[in-house]
Image (cartoon, helix red, strand yellow):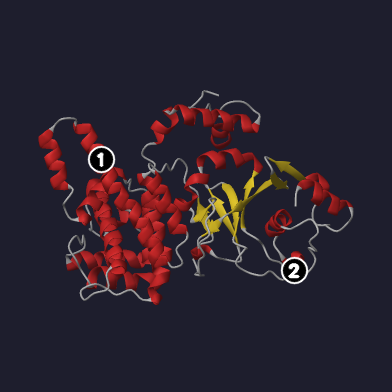
């Protein structure tokens, strides 16, 4: 229904949970109580939940509410949360009896605060398959159901996928029915990055034939080494990376991860020394990964050593899990259905965070691009308060570094 149709139902007293003045329209989208109700074409089955899922930006501010509603039948309109009631009014036909039981949604929904709608469209919409596991792009694939621990998604600003191949792989990851396949699809994005880095390096060489020869030799190194160099170049060992790794320390996951990583040990293990592994196991029991903790346990002695250790650990984790999923053979840990929660709640969030950091590296180029500058100016006008308003909204009145507004 649109705003006019809903207001008519309110006037006729068929709806009493909202007031007519709370209903409006924005860019053909229904707005209720300051929330723009936007259809979502696909939510990964790994996110299916009857709860309202918060989406926050990196500063912890609410950016939206994701509603996974199309996969189940709901008992009654009055039993829905307020967010779901808003979404159902947008979803239902004008002649629908909203007070009947067996309520069904035709699609899933994202509710966005109207003051952040323009910001979301320009900064987050296209990359939601990477950081959020949902997509605004139409696709007819279907997924099965799984469960995830967390019901809060952190949206990552300025994540820029460099090629159409990256977009396709990111979209495909949202349509995979199981965590194992979703992980591999996200890993494919890392593999695309290997090739893209090689292309960039060759372009920078010009006619340096010796340099090209060395690059081609390097490109045939072990995949794990290439992955580690990619992480060294782009990954910042910050609190987001540490939190993603700390998830592995939870007792329900740590025993399994130790078995996969260290009982089926392979080349590249940064905890090959038994004493060092035991000290790291003590740290895992505390559930906290930081430079201070690693120093106190004498795992690493200075900042550079700590950062290199974390990069090596990430590389080992990501590559070992990739091999265990892709290969089913003697010498590898063989994955089973009991391992899916670990992949879903530990490894997929980790690889998503790594991908977000890798594709954030061209942020400055993004703002220097003329098309992106035009988009920024457009989004400023969306709010009707002059240039720079998106930045000012987040930076509490500071001047916009992009347009000076």
Residue 50 location, quadrant: bottom right
Q: What SS does tag 1 mark?
A: helix
Relative side of 318 to 16, left or right: left
Residue at left offset 31%, top offset 49%: 192
Where residue 265 appears, as percent x and y from the top left, is 20, 69
Q: Nearer the viewer, residue 397 or 181?
A: 181
Where residue 354 appears, as percent x and y from the top left, is 36, 51
Q: Disc 2 marks which residue?
A: 76
Callout 2 crowding tier (Cα within 10 Å): few <14, some 14–19, many ≥20: some
Where residue 272 appears, as percent x and y from the top left, is 18, 64
The residue lying furthest to the right in this view is 12
Relative side of 351 to 154, left or right: left
Q: Disc 1 marks which residue?
A: 199
Determine whether 133 is above or below 124 in the image: below
Q: What's the CA distance linking mark 1 and mark 2?
A: 56 Å
Query: Can residue 247 be seen?
Result: no
Looking at the rendered structure, the number of numbered marks drawn on it comes to: 2
Q: Earlier in the sequence, mark 1 or mark 2?
A: 2
Relative side of 226 to 395, left or right: left
Residue at left offset 55%, top offset 24%: 405
Relative side of 97 to 224, left or right: right
Callout 1 crowding tier (Cα within 10 Å): few <14, some 14–19, many ≥20: few
Residue 164 location, quadrant: top left
Determine whether 235 is above or below 222 in the image: above
């Amino acid at each position: 229904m649109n705003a006019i149709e809903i207001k008519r139902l309110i006037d006729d007293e068929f709806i009493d949970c909202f007031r007519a003045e709370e209903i409006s329209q924005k860019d053909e989208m229904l707005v209720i109580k300051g929330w723009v109700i936007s259809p979502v074409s696909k939510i990964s089955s790994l996110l299916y939940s009857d709860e309202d899922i918060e989406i926050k930006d990196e500063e912890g501010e609410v950016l939206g509410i994701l509603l996974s509603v199309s996969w189940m039948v709901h008992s009654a309109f009055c039993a829905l949360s307020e967010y779901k009631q808003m979404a159902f009014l947008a979803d239902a036909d004008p002649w629908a009896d909203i007070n009947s039981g067996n309520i069904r949604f035709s699609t899933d929904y994202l509710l966005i605060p109207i003051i952040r709608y323009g910001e979301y469209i320009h900064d987050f919409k296209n990359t939601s398959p990477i950081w959020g596991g949902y997509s605004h792009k139409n696709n007819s694939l279907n997924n099965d159901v799984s469960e995830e621990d967390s019901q809060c998604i952190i949206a990552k600003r300025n994540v820029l996928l460099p090629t159409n191949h990256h977009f396709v792989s990111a979209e495909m990851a949202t349509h995979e029915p199981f965590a194992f396949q979703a992980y591999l699809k996200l890993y494919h994005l890392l593999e695309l990055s290997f090739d893209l880095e090689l292309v960039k390096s060759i372009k920078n060489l010009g006619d340096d034939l010796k340099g090209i020869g060395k690059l081609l030799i390097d490109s045939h190194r072990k995949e794990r080494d290439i992955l580690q160099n990619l992480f060294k170049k782009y990954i910042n060992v910050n609190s987001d990376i540490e939190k993603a790794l700390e998830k592995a320390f939870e007792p329900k996951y740590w025993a399994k991860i130790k078995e996969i990583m260290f009982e089926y040990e392979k080349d590249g293990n940064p905890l090959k020394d038994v004493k060092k592994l035991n000290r790291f196991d003590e740290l895992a029991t505390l559930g906290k990964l930081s430079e201070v903790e690693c120093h106190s346990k004498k795992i690493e002695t200075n900042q550079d050593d700590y950062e290199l250790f974390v990069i090596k650990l990430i590389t080992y984790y990501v590559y070992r899990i990739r091999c265990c999923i892709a290969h089913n053979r003697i010498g590898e840990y063989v994955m089973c259905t009991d391992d899916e929660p670990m992949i879903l709640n530990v490894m997929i969030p980790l690889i998503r965070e790594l991908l977000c950091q890798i594709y954030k590296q061209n942020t400055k180029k993004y703002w220097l691009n003329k098309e992106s500058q035009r988009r920024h100016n457009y989004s400023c006008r969306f709010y009707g308060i002059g240039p720079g308003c998106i930045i000012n909204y987040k930076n509490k009145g500071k001047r916009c570094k992009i347009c000076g507004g």
